[in-house]
Image: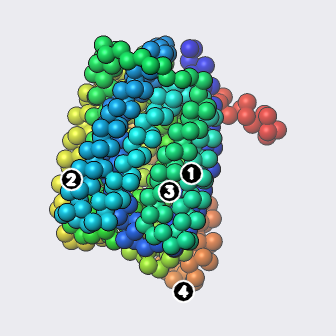
Amino acid sequence: MQVSGIKKSFAHGTFWLFIGHGVSNVASFLIFAVLARLLGPVDFGLVAFATVFIDLSRIVAVAGLPTALIRAPEWDDDDASTVFWGTAVLAIALAIVVGAGGGYLLGRFYSNELQWVLLALSLCLVIDALGETHDAKLQREFQFKSLAKRTAIATAGAGIVGVALAFAGFGVWSLVINRIASSAIRTVILWRATVWVPQPIFRRDRFVEMFTFGIHIGAVGVISVVNRQVPALIVGFLIGPAAVGFLRASSRSVNILLDLTQSPFRGTALASFSRLKDTAARVRGYRKVTRLITLVSFPIFFGVAALAGDFVVLLFGERWADSALILSMLALVGGSASLAVFVQPVLVAEGLVRLAVINMFQILLANTLVCLVTAPFGLSIFAIGFAINTYLGILQTLFLLKRAVGLPPSRVLRDIYPSFLSAGVMLLTILAVGHYVLPDYGRLVRLVILVPLGALVFTSMLAVFFRGFVWEVWRDVEPLLSPALKRLGIC
């Protein structure tokens, strides 16, 4: 595939992932807000705590095997069938171990209700595994329109089920069934969207070969999930389920924004980087997509950080007010995470998966240590410590990128500092006006005034001081956007 073709496929795939993530996340956020008002932090905390073990087990069950199919030069039906049956067996085994065995242990030492929640959620492992190979086929063929539809329909359908059960008084089980329904709908749609049916074929030699490659991908995935879930795990054990609920509300809000601003690009990055011919091309691709995504991410996340107090109470209710500081700290991290989000796809495309594993493991150790030290002092200290440590981890990842492909961190930072500085000035302006000018106004009025004010400050900073940067980003994306703009009659 030529570079121009890769760019078009990347743009087309990113567009449809953006649409899919956008629709699903708007629906997901509305559903979450309704459920947050119907249920309490303890209900969310129990499900979030159990989800830690499910998410970890899912990565192990997949073992990076679908990634091996995406990265392969050609699609092989026998290999795909081998991956399908291999992941299915791994998922069933893990569902038994985690759902039954892990649930029993948690029931004895933590909470009896958690035992049954974990057992029920373990069904998601098997259901999700049955769609992973189909998902890989759609990704390598850049069929992201089908993936977008799957994401939106699964989220909306499962959300309706969850809200209906919550209104009916099912409590925590409305969240559990919501999760199971989402997995089931997603898998059914994947099967219907993919022109491929697994055959009764299992080639042991190919499985071992792909598993050997995939285990490194799986290790990166496991460590990445552990990094995301360590806070909930430690808070659950050291503080309690209600604290996990507050953390869950904050992280869910940030994850929705990540899905809207970063996931569409991340979803197409591996397939795109893998088809570029050399390291220099991948470095250019990394720099361009990072400049673009930080231009979008920094103002959104820094704005949420500044408005977290009003945002949380207005949407979720007063009993979720303790989530405000956590949301603010996580949002400050979310914008800067754009620098690291494309490092792993670059390393995988370069065949340097082992470096990614080592880096993720080092970050995991640091996160675990910081969480263990700060959690006993309460959620506020915990959130601040976690944010500081995450920034340090991002810098470490940039140094890894220099080692792997020769891209200096200083060059990456020069690429994004206009967006960072403009968003920083915007954040300080919002905080100052909110504190000194609008302290007695209602929360909704404050948001109506401060959101457009923040947008004005950010765009003014770019227009006055960084017009060259904006023009450079526009030159990168204009060839990809112009066909769509012409169809819409904009240019």
Q: Residue at x 39, y 52 (%)?
A: 121
Separation of residues labelled 2 and 3 (CA atoms)? 30 Å
Q: How is the image coloured?
A: rainbow
Separation of residues labelled 2 and 4 (CA atoms)? 40 Å
Residue 167 in the image: state x and y as whole percent.
Answer: 56, 71
Confirm whether residue 292 shows in the render: no
Q: Amino acid at mark 3?
A: Asn
Mark 3 lies on residue: 178
Mark 4 lies on residue: 440
Residue 413 in the image: state x and y as whole percent.
Answer: 39, 41
Labelled pair 1, 4 in contact (Cβ < 8 Å): no
Separation of residues labelled 3 and 4 (CA atoms)? 39 Å
Q: Answer with mark 1 or mark 4, whichever residue precedes in sequence.
A: 1
> Tag 1, which secondary structure?
helix
Identify the disc placed on residue 368: 2
Mark 3 Cα-neighbour bin, 10 Å: few <14, some 14–19, many ≥20: many
> Tag 2, which secondary structure?
helix
Q: Looking at the rendering, which quadrant does residue 456 occupy? A: bottom right
Residue 26 in the image: state x and y as whole percent.
Answer: 60, 56
Task: Check the image and name the residue furthest to the bottom.
Answer: 440
3 vs 4, front mark: 3
- Tell me: residue 450, above or below residue 490: below
> Tag 4, which secondary structure?
loop
> Tag 3, which secondary structure?
helix
Q: How many marks?
A: 4
Separation of residues labelled 3 and 1 (CA atoms)? 9 Å
Q: Answer with mark 2 or mark 3, whichever residue precedes in sequence.
A: 3
